[in-house]
Every structure is written in C-alpha cells, then in structure tokens.
Image (cartoon, helix red, strand yellow):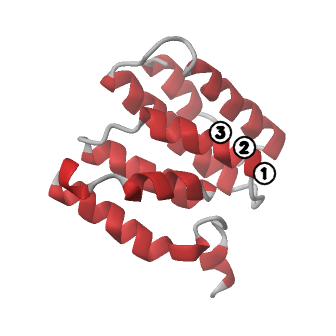
C-alpha cells in the first residue's frame, strides 16, 4: 500500500455496486500479505479500509459473516495501538462494517497498556455500539 493506491481508492465514486466494493476489499486484504507493513503503511491501509468501508455502507447490504471476520482480522492487524488516528479509524471501520470481532478484540486490550485517551475512546465505542455492532444500519432503523 502506498499513497498512490490510497489516492486511487479515495477517488472512487461514493457509491459502488456491492461486487465492486467486495473486489476492492479483497485487493486490500491481499496487500497485507506482502510482508510486514511499517507504521506509516499500516495507517495508509487503515485509511484505505475506512474509504472502502464507507462505500460498502452505501450499498445498504451487511457483509457476510466470513467477510466480516477476515476484515476484523485485517483491521486489528494494521491497528497501531499507540496512535489516536489509527484508533479513530478502527472505531469508524468497526461501526461502518459491523466488525464485532474487531470491537471485542480492541476492547479486550488491557487499558493500562494504552494511552488514556485511546482507552477512553474504546470504552466509549463499546458503550455506543453495544449489542448492535454487527448491524451497521441499526441507527437508521431506530429513527
């Protein structure tokens, strides 16, 4: 993942058909298999995933369970625990894609090993999403 690839993803139309979003997500997942990314590359991957998560959300379709499990593992793999920006992106991605496994993992990290603000953000996300994290459209249904 590099800046050019992130720019390409960012330039995609706001709405993409579900099959095209799935193709882009699969491509991003494959990019993680090419060695261990450094902190800067991890942040680029998180930003790319956040962009694609927004496009996925626009399809109004919940991803299959297996896809959400893979994306949870990816998001946790590129999350930089010491970075507030990375944590904010993770929380946004969890909300947008319904990644309950990622939320469970992130909120299970010992808060003593995290910056105070990062631990607080994770606690807030858990309180906000609660049992509805698996359905990113819950807030729409409540209105």
Residue 126 drawn at (x, y percent): 43, 69
Q: Which residue is mark 3?
A: 70
For label 1, the SS is: loop
Q: Residue furthest top?
A: 35
Residue 63 lies, with reference to residue 47, above or below; the image says below
Quarter of the image containing the C terminus? Answer: bottom right
Say whether residue 14 is visible: no
Residue 125 drawn at (x, y percent): 40, 67
Residue 2 lies, with reference to residue 74, above or below; the image says above
Identity of the residue drawn at 55% across and 35% down: 74
For label 3, the SS is: helix
Identity of the residue drawn at 34% across and 19% down: 38
Q: Are marks 1 and 2 in contact (CB under 8 Å)?
A: yes
Q: Which comes sooner in the sequence, label 1 or label 3?
A: 1
> Badge 3, how many Cα within 10 Å: few under 14, some, many 20+?
some
Q: In the displayed structure, does residue 94 sit left or right of residue 24?
A: left
Q: Which residue is mark 2?
A: 67
Residue 129 lies, with reference to residue 74, above or below; the image says below
> Badge 1, how many Cα within 10 Å: few under 14, some, many 20+?
few
Q: In the displayed structure, does residue 139 sit left or right of residue 1?
A: right
For label 2, the SS is: helix
Residue 112 lies, with reference to residue 37, above or below; the image says below
């Amino acid at each position: 993942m590099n800046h050019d690839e992130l720019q390409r993803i960012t330039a995609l139309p706001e709405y993409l058909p579900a099959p095209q979003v799935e193709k882009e997500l699969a491509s991003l997942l494959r990019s993680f298999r090419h060695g261990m990314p450094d902190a800067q590359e991890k942040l680029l991957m998180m930003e790319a995933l956040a962009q694609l998560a927004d496009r996925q959300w626009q399809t109004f379709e919940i991803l299959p369970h297996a896809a959400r499990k893979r994306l949870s593992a990816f998001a946790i793999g590129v999350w930089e625990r010491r970075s507030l920006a990375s944590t904010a992106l993770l929380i946004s991605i969890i909300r947008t894609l319904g990644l309950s496994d990622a939320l469970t993992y992130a909120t299970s990290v010992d808060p003593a090993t995290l910056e105070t603000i990062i631990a607080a953000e994770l606690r807030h996300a858990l309180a906000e999403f609660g049992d509805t994290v698996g359905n990113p459209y819950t807030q729409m249904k409540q209105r």
